[in-house]
Image (cartoon, rainbow, N blue to C red):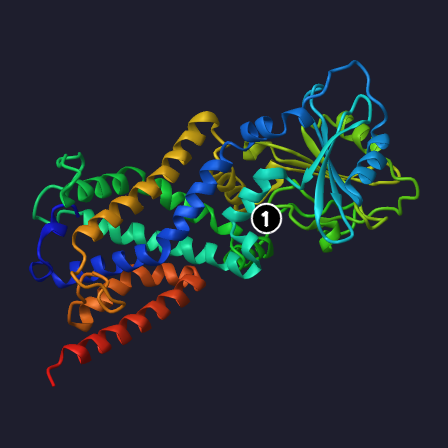
Amino acid sequence: MAHDLDKAPEELSGAYRAVWRWHFYAGVFVMPFLMLLALTGAIYLFKDEIDQVVYRPMIQVADAPGVVSPDAWLPAAAQAGQGRVANVLIPERGDQAARVRVDRPDGSQRTVFVDPHTGRVTGVTGYGGVMETVKTIHSLSLFGPAMNLLVEVAAGWAIVLFATGIYLWQPRGRKVATVALTATDVRRRPFWRDLHALVGLYVGGIVLFLAVTGMPWSAVWGDQFLGFVRAQGWGRPPAPAAAKAWSHAGHHDSPSGVGWTMEHAVLYGRTAHDPSLARVMAVADSRGLARPYVVNIPQTANLAWAVARQTRQAEDARTLYVDGQTGAVLADARWAQFGMGAKAFEWGIAVHQGMQYGQLNRLVMLAGCIGVWLLAISGLMMWWKRRPPRLSPLRMGAPPAPPGARIRTAVLGIVLPLCILYPLTGLSLLAALLIDRIGQALLRRRTVPS
């Protein structure tokens, strides 16, 4: 790619020009979104450290040998958060506050920090704090439900970028492909060309992995594919014989912290007349559920309480479903019971979030996020140095379209399979093709002498 892009467009093969053209358009369409996703994703990799810095006065408490009854935490949190307690994150250590999610009547949520030893509220913040805001920006859901559709579009086009970039990088008998920086003058395009090629070569695979494993967050593909996995029996384990079948939770009872496999899955038990957080915690502790874990408190009286371990490695996933009245364990869902599709999902998400393989995993994902920005900056610099003297919507500096239906068919052969796999990406591709055809027609009309 690095050497071929120095040639005049007419010296390049038609197929090369066509792929280069779509690589250019894919970058224009998707790179701003990828830059936003990379920035917020890089920040979210350090979620725990940022939370400790921002909310340290609320999180840190004096360790003590005893605790007040966990049932005393709930009214204090409900009063401080001015709403109904939905779940409680039980901390791993005694010097950390319990985090209680409170759902308010206006639909908003709060996180209330409670000292487990005294029952005293140490602070209140918006649900999830600053990192929850970063997360909603990363998923684009902060800008409205419809904007989440762009996650799938951006991820699909990122795959198109990777596929076309690999094609452009190959030497095809001209010169050896670029594997080291050969140009050192930052004022000239060859430097940015080499930098772009090298970043794409060395971190492009990470960016591709992030794009593919980010698909579960998309509103269309993620929901449909996860539904397919469950329908094929590749997802959550079957409901235990002693309990009723899995049910789909209503919005107010959807359990948190249970991962994608058990998302929205609830079990019905006996009606709880005197539900007790302390009782459920005692059951979880006696079953050896490692802390930290989240205890979900259902609003519906006969729903089981879902108690989910907060894990870093996918294979540590475990969720207990506890009858709120009797304390009986209705189900104990573990990694070994998941289907192959669920395991692939959970593993991909854990790696995507930089948790599965420890610090090295996080640094590799961080390199991918930095790589997105380097690709964007180097691509912009290359375009700036070869831009047309007079820019216009019809003269953006894209490589000229080559003639011939066979060449266009060859290019579509690269991108169409991806667009079939990701429907929203396919629709955006059709829109891009239509705009390209209209733009070429208008440009030809302008250049035809009168």
Q: Nearer the viewer, residue 321 or 405?
A: 405
Identify which residue is drawn at 38% across, 62% down: 419
**Residue 401 visible in the shown view:** yes
Label 1 CA crowd tier, 10 Å (few <14, some 14–19, many 20+): many
Residue 341: x %, y % from top left: 53, 47
Q: Which residue is label 1 attached to?
A: 235
Q: Nearer the viewer, residue 91 or 355?
A: 91
Residue type pointed to by label 1: Gly
Residue 241: x %, y % from top left: 76, 46
**In the picture, residue 319 is in which quadrant?**
top right
Identify which residue is drawn at 32% across, 55% down: 160
Identify which residue is drawn at 52% across, 45% down: 345
**In the picture, residue 364 is in which quadrant?**
top left
In the figure, 447 relative to 195: above or below?
A: below
Residue 57: x %, y % from top left: 67, 24
Residue 332: x %, y % from top left: 71, 37
Element at label 1? loop
Identify which residue is drawn at 86% across, 48% down: 301
Residue lying farthest to the right in this orientation: 273
Please state if 366 lies on the left or on the right of 82 as rendered.
Answer: left
**Residue 249 visible in the shown view:** no
In the figure, 105 relative to 307: above or below?
A: below
